[in-house]
Image: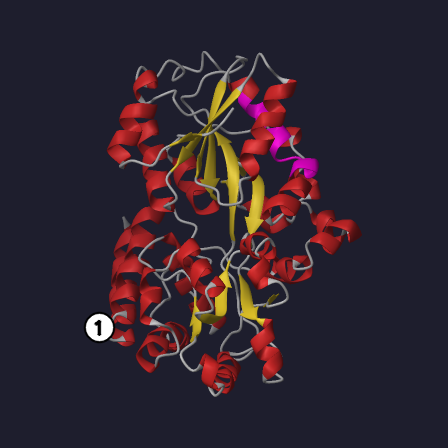
Amino acid sequence: MRPRRVTALLSALLATVLVAGCGGAAADGSEENGRGPITLAQGKDPSGVMPGIVAEWNRQHPDQPVDLIELPESPDMQRQAMVQNAQLKSDAFTVLDLDVVWNAEFAAHRWIDELPAERYNLDEMLPTTVETGMYRGRLYSVPNSSDGALLFYRKDLLDKVGAAPPTTWDELKRICAQVRDIPANADIGCYAGQLEKTEGGTANVAEVINSAGGEIIDDNGQPRVNSPQARSGLGFLVDGFREGLIPREALTFKEEEGRRAFVDGKLLFHRQWPYQWSTLAEDPSMKGKFAVAPLPGRDGPGTSSLGGHNLAVSKFGKNKATARDFIGFATSERQQRQNTLVGSKAPTYTRLYDDPALRQEAPYLPVLRQSILGAEPRPQVVRYPEVTAAIQDTSYAAMTGEISTKEALEELQRRLERLVQQ
């Protein structure tokens, strides 16, 4: 089936998608073992891999078809649609494609079902990815793809100045100055990531803080963001805008805006998720012009935020037996191998990173594995929406020059302390 594309405002989305399920028919668990048609709700996917998975499932299971519901591109709007679906106890969504940072919230509120861990090949997956689906020692979502940030760079321009990819922020600045000394590249932006006030902004801010030796919330759940290390990390972004290292328009960049700027020759270095590899590799204008490296940090290689998506079963969905079977099908090693080939998705199966044929087609895999294994999760808290909003508000205010880096982190520390105490 073709995905139902939802591109209007969220209110229109809910009116269109949720109206059929407002009765909450499955809220009592009566559909726990039912089989039949189901829906899969996920955000807009530039890689386009999921429609192929759904089509293959539907060919093999014509009496249990999956209808792919495509939510908006914005992660915040995706989450809002799923939360409202749960609050209405609607059966419109059966399988949910969750950002890994939503797992604790959805599990804690009992919006998703616990899953039988023994049915899935978790022992064959990277342990860091499996952990993203756990809540209080139980499995609530199955890793479908992981994500670690990569530093995409203009290899042709670095070759011109005889430079290797940077491992530190100071090296990045030095290389950019050399490239800008070439008259044709005098106006190129040095660096950008996803810095708009969205979830991508949270991931980017967490990365620079972690890459400077800081942390936002420690292992005991206590805020620790008002530190010299965190000031150094956030300062890389704040100073980058002030000094012209980062172009001002990067304040509006999500994934696709930054990708387009990189393709258009406006960026030398671009912090991005691995899906960008396939889109660049298919672009004739980019042939031989780009490569990837680990993120740089303050004193050496940086630390990525751990990304990825997991599949979960809505508490209120129908035909949950079909849903659990589909999750096993969609997250299988075979499918993840294909996802890597088609859409540069980061697999969660350990052995795929050493598959010679796959590495031939996806040469970025060694760098990606390094990124994922060294990645740090964003704060794993039940009240994650309020936490990420606090990170976005304060860091964005610092990057736009409304407040200082010091003031931003002091305010963030205060807000986080209130949130974790409630």
Corner quadrant of residue 231: bottom left
Q: Does 335 appear above or below 54?
A: below
**Which residue occupies 36% across, 72% down?**
247
**Which residue occupies 53% across, 73% down?**
296
Query: Which residue range is magenta in the image?
Result: 323-335
Confirm whether the magenta stretch covers residue 183. Answer: no
Q: Does 253 appear above or below 161?
A: above
Q: How many discs mark residues in the rendered view?
A: 1
Is any atom of residue 288 visible in this view?
Answer: yes
- Which residue is label 1 attached to? 403
**Which residue occupies 34% across, 18% down?**
21
Please tell me whether the stretch drawn in magenta is mainly helix, strand or loop: helix
The image position of residue 365, as x and y in percent, is 67, 57
Q: Does 370 appear above or below 96?
A: below
Corner quadrant of residue 255: bottom left
Corner quadrant of residue 375: bottom right
Q: Residue furthest right?
A: 356
